[in-house]
């Protein structure tokens, strides 16, 4: 578990030097030169607080919640906090009693209370191994209800590599590695409205060392459907005879 503090306002080196030397003319803000043949260096994160999953005299998640609250309270008021909890309830990381509803659900309630504080700028991302805790279980259903957005990554099995490579992708694109299912999206305003047009649609994801890409997923035409196969293989440009009238 880690807590990342990110300052919302950053000052570049050019702006800092021009502010220090008042006698020099200020340089334009967005006129930097970049070498496209070289990789840009990502700025280092200002502060990351790691919270170890260690046993104490207090209940397991109570000590974690206190450390989260203390880290947020001691930060400047304009700091944006991003809480990352990977592999929640994984047996290799969490003790057996952590997967009990009376243990994990109060922690998630306290985390929502921490995020909904008027002066707090907190967001959280949680991942769970569905191979160990399926969505059909009551515990996972309660965990989903306590989150604003829920997505599921379903990788293709090894026996379905032919299906993945035969998807509707071009020669330059990478084949999808799995399906992304959107079960819930965050509410946009207090009246309960939100954009639910992407819920239930078929999406595919591709994961590599450089990027994580999400794109629409569609199956290739059936083998017996010759018209669809010819339409998929032909160019999308209409013929000249079709344009004349």
Image (cartoon, grey):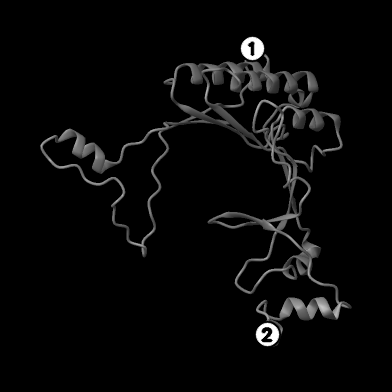
- For discs 1 and 2, the disc positioned in front in the rendered view: 2
Q: Are marks 1 and 2 in contact (CB under 8 Å)?
A: no
Horizontally, residue 147 falls left or right of residue 131, namely: left
Q: Is residue 221 above or below residue 47?
A: below
Q: The C terminus lies in which quarter of the figure?
A: bottom right
Find residue 40 and report its image quarter. Answer: bottom left
Q: Earlier in the sequence, mark 1 or mark 2?
A: 1
Q: Position of residue 15 (x, y in %)?
A: 25, 40
Find residue 35 and report its image quarter. Answer: bottom left
SS assignment at label 2: loop
Residue at the limit of the structure toward the right, as seen here: 224
Q: Position of residue 113 (x, y in %)?
A: 64, 18
Q: Position of residue 58 (x, y in %)?
A: 65, 12
**Badge 2: few (under 14), some or many (20 or more) residues near its Cα, within 10 Å?**
few
Could you say which is closer to the camera, residue 14 or residue 234? 234
**Residue at 41 percent of width and 31 percent of height:** 7
Count of numbered circles on the image: 2
The dot on residue 244 is: 2
Q: Give the distance between the C-alpha atoms of the residues marked 1 and 2, in whole angstroms.
A: 83 Å
Residue underneath mark 1:
57
**Residue at 50 percent of width and 20 percent of height:** 72
SS assignment at label 1: loop
Q: Position of residue 191 (x, y in %)?
A: 70, 26
């Amino acid at each position: 578990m880690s807590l990342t503090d990110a300052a919302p306002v950053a000052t570049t080196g050019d702006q800092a030097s021009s502010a220090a030397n008042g006698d020099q003319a200020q340089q334009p803000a967005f006129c930097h030169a970049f070498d496209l043949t070289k990789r840009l260096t990502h700025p280092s994160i200002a502060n990351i607080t790691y919270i170890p999953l260690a046993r104490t005299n207090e209940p397991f998640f109570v000590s974690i919640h206190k450390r989260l609250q203390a880290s947020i309270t001691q930060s400047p008021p304009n700091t944006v906090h991003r809480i990352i909890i990977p592999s929640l309830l994984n047996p290799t990381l969490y003790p057996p009693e952590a997967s009990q509803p009376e243990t994990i659900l109060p922690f998630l309630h306290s985390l929502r209370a921490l995020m909904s504080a008027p002066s707090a700028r907190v967001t959280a991302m949680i991942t769970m191994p569905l191979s160990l805790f399926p969505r059909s279980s009551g515990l996972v259903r309660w965990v989903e209800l306590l989150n604003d957005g829920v997505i599921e990554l379903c990788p293709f099995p090894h026996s379905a590599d032919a299906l993945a490579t035969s998807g509707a992708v071009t020669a330059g694109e990478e084949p999808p590695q799995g399906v992304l299912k959107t079960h819930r999206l965050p509410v946009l305003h207090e009246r309960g409205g939100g954009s639910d047009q992407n819920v239930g649609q078929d999406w595919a994801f591709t994961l590599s060392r450089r990027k994580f890409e999400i794109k629409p997923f569609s199956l290739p035409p059936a083998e017996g459907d010759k018209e669809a196969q010819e339409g998929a293989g032909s160019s999308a440009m209409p013929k000249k005879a079709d344009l004349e009238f």
